[in-house]
Amino acid sequence: MKLRACSAPAAGRIGLQEEGRTAPAFAGVLYGTPNRVWGVRRIGLNIIGLHKHMAKKVSSLDDLPPILVGVSGEYFVAAELSRRGYIASITLRNTRGIDILAANADASRSVGIQVKTNRGKKKNWMLNEKAENAVSDTMFYVFVNLNGPDERPAYHVVPSKDVADYVRESHRRFKSKPGRDGAPHHDTSMRHFTDKVNKYLDRWESLGLEK
């Protein structure tokens, strides 16, 4: 199979062409078979845009573009799962609500993981209102603190039910308290999850993959 770079005017980006077809090329993982290309994993930045960011040395995580913060978190989680002996596969961006599929060695149990990542050490992660109802015994969140360029990330592994209960209750409390002007808070789709006491820190066993 031969691939060559080509222009993709409709997408306004550099593309890959194979057998007369053009697909937008995004920074990410090219995957496929010897006979065809299945696709390129989208992470929201085209190759040229990513190159401009990578040309600058990241001396602080504050310099890291938001899209790469999220991607870093996903790959760190996948690597940590692999290090612990599990099978981890990062999904396509069109797999709604699941960033990583993880399974035990004999594939007798698998779970879906959504990853949320912060640059620093603040144990507060942003979600949306959908988290209140996204509940499944096989759905988990891993909240990541990147901490620093030379530090090990921290992982908070939380069942989706615990996240749903937390964000629902915290949002109820938010609406019940008056704002600075004494008026009720306006409703918002934003939700937050915190783990200030490290209740879920490194709770990988909660995934149930050791059974």
Image (cartoon, helix red, strand yellow):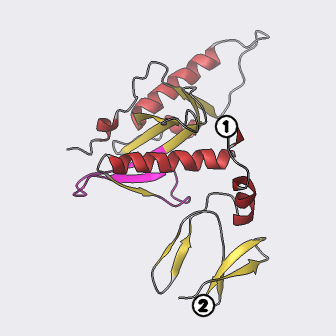
Query: Going by the picture, which residue comes out furthest to the top?
Result: 182
- Helix, strand, or loop for circle 2? loop
User: Which residue appears at 45% of the width and 18% of the height?
Assistant: 197
- Tell me: 87 left or right of 52: left
Instruction: Kindly report the secondary structure that dominates the magenta region of the rendered protein.
Output: loop
- Tell me: 43 left or right of 38: right
Q: Quadrant of the C terminus?
A: top left
Whole-number angstrom distance, CA of label 2 to CA of label 1 = 43 Å
Question: Is residue 84 placed above or below 147 in the rendered structure?
Answer: below
Residue 167 part of the magenta segment: no
Count the marks: how many? 2
Tell me the amino acid under the disc marked 2.
Answer: Glu
Earlier in the chain: of badge 2 and badge 1, it is 2
Q: Which residue is mark 1?
A: 60
User: Which residue appears at 58% of the width and 24% of the height?
Assistant: 171
Residue 44: horizontal and vertical position, in percent?
67, 57
Residue 55: horizontal and vertical position, in percent?
73, 55
Residue 199: horizontal and vertical position, in percent?
39, 23
Residue 111 part of the magenta segment: yes
Q: Which residues are magenta?
A: 91-114
Question: Is residue 191 placed above or below 182 in the rendered structure?
Answer: below
- Tell me: 144 left or right of 48: left
Q: Which residue is mark 2?
A: 19
Is residue 5 or residue 156 the one in the foreground?
Answer: 5
